Amino acid sequence: MMRILRQGQRWIIAALIGTVGLVFVISFGVKTGHLSRPSDTVVVVGKDIYSLRYVARIRSNIEDQYRKQMQVDFESKEFRDILNQTAIQTAVQQAIMTQEAKRLGISVGDDEVRATIRGYFADETSQFPIEQYRTYAERNFGSQHAFEEVIREDLRRAKLMRIWNASVAVSEAEARDAALTDLEQAQIAFVTFDSEQSAASLKISDEQIKTYLAKHKKDVRALYDERIAQYNKPERIRARHILLRRASGATPEELAALKQKIEAIRERITKGEDFATVATEVSEDPGSKNQGGDLGFFTHEQMVPEFAKAAFALSIGAVSEPVETSFGYHLIRVEEKIPASVQLFEEVQNELAKEQLAQELTKETQEKLAQEVAAGIGNGRTLIQVAQERKLNIERTDLFPRNAGSYIPGLGKSPEVLAAAFALSLDAPSPKKIFHVDGKPVLIELLDRTRPTDAELTPIVEAKKNEILTARRQTLSAAWLSKRRDELEKAKKLQVFPELLGSDS
């Protein structure tokens, strides 16, 4: 359960981090005056000063937003640093945008402010609740004027965003191509020239190994070091056990009775009954009961500490006293022991040298074979025809989309093969080009390629256009804000005092 909770926290935090780049929320707060810096200042951008109350309000809005979007209730202290960072970043972005809007001469009239406020507060009868509005503004902003100025700045930034958005365009053809990419599919056949499979059957003489080792001892040693765990084997034992399970929430009296029961079972064994037979009869471990309690070979680390300590201390054939673990009470009998061992480099160097030499030789052979097969393609002969003549293994994919993220089913990740599959035509399906996927030569042949009809394509073009527009607008805004922030930092016109948000806001 804790693992699930921790994983959940990680993805929520990741989502919050993603918002740091560009976040715009309605920021009902109070912006203080200019020049001097009051003690509750969190952000200063040029001459504009933003108070703790202002940034805390942004933080609260962001937290509320994520509670609704994620449908999860989390304690804000668990994500305090991320929320604080996001709130401060948002305040800085709003300040920069406000300055840019003013520089461009963007203004917001009183009538626009009043219309926006009326939209917030008007009830179903379209009557404006003046007393409710006055109370809200004075309680949260100190005065109606302060609240109206916050609304004015929000509207000013919204106008700036509309100017930015209008500067970005996506053509109909571009949107159509993107939609086509989402819907188009291809199917290919491919032949992989696998040197690893061929290496296993290659015959190499002792003299070849000796010569290779003399030239490549460092490489062979590096392979040994990479596999050191394979050659350093810890002590292992094979044991049987009998388990009597403890009930969840068992009382001390119940545990004492369980211990007495297993002590009686031990007495049966010490008086001559076969351990395996008794285990089959009484053990409550379903995984080993029918095997006479046999657990097979295991290392110390593979068992819970109490069990491992008792088992590895026993001599072969001995039966343990009752051992208590979180599962219940155990009796353990050791059947075999294999001591820890270390294979030195000198003991395995010839084996490793043979493996590396075989891989190098077969890699050269497979590359040459791929070149020969590629040379046979053309003049009406396809990859499949040439491969069948040579009795090579031919694999076929299912249909896969163009936006598959460079992954080819059954073959692996290869942007090059993906691009080629959708560039080929059924008139010329087999290119002579040799691709390399995971270091192995690969040849491909296009088997099928499906393109959506106009009736299938048209409905999603507009949605794709909006998707591209949104992404480009966000990229443009984020790039401009980042550049402007860097300029302000270099000019020492941007200051942040995050320590004021150190406590839960």
Image: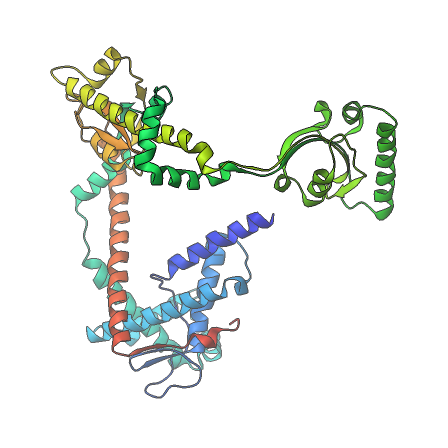
Image-quadrant location for residue 441: top left
> Can you give x and y, in whole percent of width and height, for residue 302 in the image?
62, 39
With respect to residue 100, does 274 lie above or below? Answer: above
Q: Is residue 159 rendered to the left or right of residue 246?
A: left
Residue extending farthest to the left is 379
Residue at 31% over, 30% down: 211
Image-quadrant location for residue 379: top left
Residue at 38% over, 86% down: 37
Task: Specify whether residue 44 is in view.
Answer: yes
Q: Total of numbered circles in the picture?
A: 0
> Can you give x and y, in whole percent of width and height, for residue 367 in the image?
23, 26
> Can you give x and y, in whole percent of width and height, for residue 274 in the image?
81, 23
> Can you give x and y, in whole percent of width and height, for residue 320 in the image?
79, 37
Residue at 88% over, 33% down: 264
> Which of the two residues, 253 or 294, is positioned nearer the viewer here?
294
Task: Specify whether residue 409 is in view.
Answer: no
> Which of the two residues, 163 or 399, is positioned nearer the viewer here?
399
Color style of the picture: rainbow
With respect to residue 78, does 129 lie above or below? Answer: below
> Which of the two residues, 336 or 12, is positioned nearer the viewer here?
336
Image-quadrant location for residue 288: top right
